Amino acid sequence: MEQFAAWLIDTYPLSEDQNRQTLKEGLKLFRQGNVIHAYQEGSSLTGKVQDNGQKHVLLDAEIGDLSRCSCGASTLCPHQVATFLTIWSQTNTIASLIDAWKDEATENIVPVLASARTKEVTSFEDTSLASWLDFVDYQHAEFKSSIPTKRTYLTGLTHAFFPKLRLQAPKKAEIRPLFLLHASLYCMEQVISSYDSSQPYQYIADILHRFVDIVEEESKGLFHSAIAFQLDSLLKESRQLIRLKLLQQEEPFIREMFYVYQFTWNDVFQRRNWMASELKELEGKDSLQAELAKTHLLFLQKKDEAALKLVRKNGNQYAPYVFHWLQALVSAKAKDRLENWLSTALPIVTDYIHSEPTYDRKRQLTKHLLKLLTDYALETKHDQLYKEALRKLMPYSYGEYEWFLFETKSYRKWVELQLWMGFELSGLEAYKLKEIKKADPYALFPLYHVAINKALEQRNKTAYKEATSLLKALHSLYKKEKLEDVWLQYLQQLKEGTKRLRSFQEELKKGRFSYD
């Protein structure tokens, strides 16, 4: 590694303008997280760089002149610099390399670089994002070298590394939240880069969401101080960085990076002229990430028709993200906007819920959506969309649908729902049956008829006794409804149909059932 660094410094001295420009552009690509999958294998250093498409870099640590990049450059290019910086930063500080590049004579460069590992970045400039990132990067390298095994790395990020950064953050109230926001984003990048197929996705996602929560919290802390013009330079750099992080993020973690974008634009970059400028930056980009960013900016500007056009265009891809926009409208009690959004989003979201792989996930999302729709119904006094969702989300909405029908005294539909679900009379709540028996006895007829038939199908004496007991209860319901003639017809048909079941006929006699 030091040998390649020495070749780099010797061959491309910073006394030349072109080399300084190459380093500057390489640093920018590195700091913006454009380098992905960078690693060292033997004397080869390999990486991919996102820069108007993906560039493939191969560096030769022993013979630097053999290094190449798919961008076609015949000499050192920013992609090669960014790839080397990424790998170098895993065990050294960037500051050590830059200092050596600027100051040291060629013959002394290797020992200086070899000893640079011990050079500490112990402070940062309060108003320099680059300084913050260098500081966090150095602290991360120190942390990573101190952990006993890789197994403790991810838990260490949340329980050791980030708490230490919190203690080291600037004390000034107006910039402290922004520093912690970037520290959280840095940690998210490390978590994402450590993900591989051997790790459960949900485990990684849970860790990421801890940092997403911190981003949301710190964004809210910046709501008022972000208006101060002395932060404009930091905020401009932050906007550019967060946009690039989102645009470059690949699945399966686009959602988490979009939350960062969403929360920061909700509270930190909320100036209208900044939104217009951001939309210009996103023009011509049609990736899912760019479309999401555009939709959120349009949403914040209340340009709902343009935003919903993108929702309809992207369909199911947007489903996981729609919940946040709906929640924001519910919280703001923006009932007119919410109705407009729901009419477009509800079919998309219900299809998405049905497509989820596990019952628990389907139930979780159903519960969340119905809670939003309940709040909407209470606010607007309109429950049509809520009832529509209840029907479309069955069976995952059973608990809410059953309660809704009972509370609205739709007893016959309540009974239909129990029969559709295949629930037995004996398993239903007694107080609800008692209430329906008082208010609408006729509604319970189908439940009793089905229960009697199921008992008879068991073909044993215990079941026949159960069937007879149910018949007595059913007879009392017929009496309440003054349908004795219908009851007698039913009883006659039942006796005729079961005349070969002698044990049941005996139970009927014991129960004093007759045709008269």
Image (cartoon, helix red, strand yellow):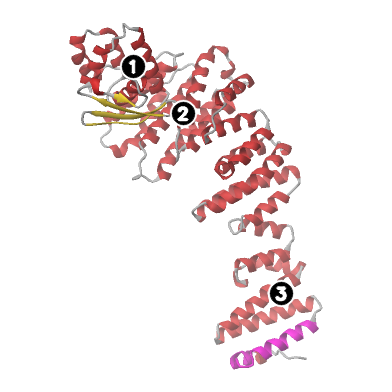
| Boundaries of the magenta span | 484-507
Residue at horizontal 67 percent and vertical 77 percent from the top: 449
Q: Position of residue 33 (x, y in %)?
A: 41, 26
Per the image, the residue denoted by label 3 is 445
Q: Position of residue 270 (x, y in %)?
A: 60, 23
Q: How many marks?
A: 3
Per the image, the residue denoted by label 2 is 245
The answer to which quarter of the image holds residue 87 is: top left
**Residue 153 seen anywhere in this rendered image of the structure:** yes
Gap in angstroms between the C-alphas marked 1 and 2: 26 Å
**Residue 174 seen anywhere in this rendered image of the structure:** no
Above or below residue 175? Residue 37 is below
Per the image, the residue denoted by label 1 is 122
The answer to which quarter of the image holds residue 467 is: bottom right
State the SS at label 1.
loop
Residue at horizontal 73 percent and vertical 70 percent from the top: 443
Above or below residue 453? Residue 221 is above
Q: Amino acid at mark 1?
A: Thr
The foreground one among 412 and 244 is 244
- Answer with mark 3 or mark 2, whichever residue precedes in sequence: 2
Gap in angstroms between the C-alphas marked 3 and 2: 62 Å
Q: Is residue 203 magenta?
A: no
Task: Determine the main secondary structure of the stretch shown in magenta.
Answer: helix
State the SS at label 2.
helix
- Answer with mark 1 or mark 2, whichever residue precedes in sequence: 1
Gap in angstroms between the C-alphas marked 3 and 1: 79 Å
Residue at horizontal 39 percent and vertical 25 percent from the top: 165
- Camera-side mark, 3 or 2: 2
Q: Amino acid at mark 3?
A: Phe
- Camera-side mark, 1 or 2: 2
